[in-house]
Image (tube, grey):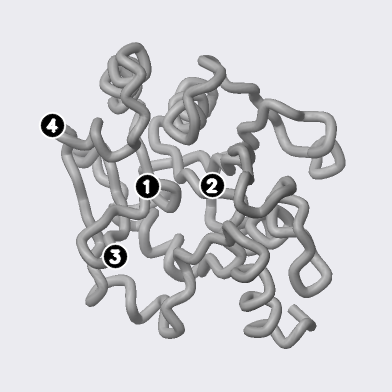
Amino acid sequence: MSTSHSPFSLAIIAGGKSRRMGRDKAFLQLGGKTLIERVIERSADLGQAETILITNKPAPYAHLKLPMFCDALPGKGSLGGIYTALLEARSDFVLVLACDMPFISARLLRFMTEQIDDNVDIIAPRVDGYPQALHAIYRKTCIKPIREQLAADRLKIIRFYAGMRLRYLDEPEYAPYDPDGRCFANLNTPEELAEAERLLGGTG
C-alpha cells in the first residue's frame, strides 16, 4: 500500500453557510493566518498529484493560486462538494478536507494515504464510532452512489457508505498522530474560534 503506486489528489472543500459563525469560516484569522491557509500549509507536502479547491465563490480564493471548481450540482451541501471533487480530480483517490480544520496533522494524513489500496473505496477516521467524512479519502467508485443520493436529495454524507468497501481508522490507529485530540476539530462558532486562538497562544 504505497502512495507511489496509488497516486491521489487533495481536495479542500470551501463552502457552507457558516450560519453559526456569521461569516465565511475559510478567511477567519487564527494565529495570524486564515483557516484555509492553515489547511493548505499543513497538507502541502503529502505527495499528492494535485491540490484543488471546491468553492462556489472563486474570486475571494484566487490569491491562493489553486485550481478551483464550482459545485457540479449546486445546493447539495458537503456531499455535493465531495461529488464535485471526485468528478474533477485527476486521480482515482481523493483526500477530502474541510477548510475549517486548523489542527490537521500532516503525519496523520500521510498515514491515511498509506492505507490506499485497490480493495477500498473509503478511508476514514472514526471518532466515538462516527466517521470524519470531511477528513477522509474517497475513490471515484463513490461517484455513482453519491449521485444517486444527491438525486434523491439525501445529503447526509455517510448514508452512501453502505455497500462501499470501507477502511476505518479508530482511535488506537490515529491517536499516535493526534496526541492532543485536535486533528478533527472544526470551528463553527466564535467561541470555538476563541478557544482555538487560546490553544495557539495567539502566535500560531
Residue at left offset 77%, top offset 82%: 202
Q: Position of residue 20 (x, y in %)?
A: 61, 52
Could you tell me how far apart the alpha carbons at marks 2 and 3 are, in whole angstroms? Answer: 25 Å
Q: Earlier in the sequence, mark 4 or mark 3?
A: 3
Task: Name the residue beneath numbered marker 2.
Answer: 48
Label 1: state its secondary structure.
loop
Question: Mark number for residue 127?
Answer: 3
Choose the circle earlier in sequence order: 4 or 1. 1
Q: Earlier in the sequence, mark 1 or mark 2?
A: 2
Is any part of residue 90 visible from this angle?
no
Q: Which residue is mark 1?
A: 133
Residue extending furthest toward the left? 163
* Front residue of this view, candidates 77 and 107: 77
Crowding at label 2, few (<14), some or many (≥20) Cα neighbours within 10 Å?
many
Rendered location of residue 137, percent (x, y) = 38, 45
Give the labeled residue for mark 4.
Answer: 163
